[in-house]
Image (cartoon, helix red, strand yellow):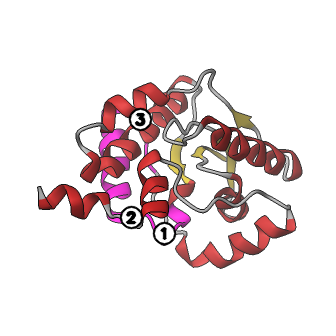
Amino acid sequence: MTTLLLHACCGPCATYPVEHLRHQGYQVTALWYNPNVHPFQEHQLRLESMQRLAQAVDLPLLIPEGYDFIRYLRAVVGREAERCQHCFRLRLTKTAEIARQNGFAAFTTTLLISPYQKHELLRQIGEEVAAETGVPFLYQDLRPGYSQSRKLSKKHDLYRQQYCGCIYSEWERHSRVDIIVEEKQR
């Protein structure tokens, strides 16, 4: 059985991918590393939801110490229009490094289930990180399982968030301002 380290952005988004990947024969371990999530209370709500799912479906869960919010900010401040690129690279690099250190055969991410994420960018960065670390990136378009993930998250009574997690997406959600458009107009 192939070992796979699955970067988990949240419990709800992990539901279907874990089930799907296990059905394909992967031995899945999840990694919680989301320094982009702000405020800290939101980070903790999402972490608790992920822990609840891990316990419910007998999923090994790795949780690195600390909250790398400052590292995230250093990666994106001044580059807000490209923030997703920098955020994906930060999280996928950490996942690949931990996969390499712990002997996983490959890595992937639950971000691939979201119809709101930039899949081609995720795939490109995943493949670049794989080349840099020597750990293969497993790309699968998991979006067809998105509605199933919503059902599974309700079944497990998981906290569902209303934004990707970063301070910028939260601001956009409340102010109805698109930072990317605003940045390009300058």
* Disc on the earlier residue, 3 or 1: 3
Task: Looking at the picture, tell me which residue is in the foreground, 121 or 126.
Answer: 121
Instruction: Report whether residue 135 is seen.
Output: no
The residue indicated by pointer 2 is: 119
Q: Main secondary structure of the magenta part?
A: helix
| Amino acid on which disc 2 is placed | His
Give the magenta-colored segment's residue range: 112-137
The structure residue drawn at horizontal position 32% and vertical position 42%, both measured from the top left corner, is 86
Q: How dense is the environment of label 1, judged by Cα within 10 Å: few (below 14), some, or many (20 and up)?
A: some
Task: Looking at the picture, tell me which residue is in the foreground, 135 or 88.
Answer: 88
Q: How dense is the environment of label 3, judged by Cα within 10 Å: few (below 14), some, or many (20 and up)?
A: some
Residue 32 in the figure: left or right of residue 128:
right
The image position of residue 75, as x and y in percent, is 32, 33
* Disc on the earlier residue, 2 or 3: 3
**Label 2 – label 3 distance at C-alpha:** 17 Å
The residue indicated by pointer 3 is: 93
Residue 90 in the figure: left or right of residue 13:
left
Q: Quadrant of residue 146?
A: bottom right
Q: Are marks 3 and 1 in contact (CB under 8 Å)?
A: no
Element on which disc 3 rests: helix
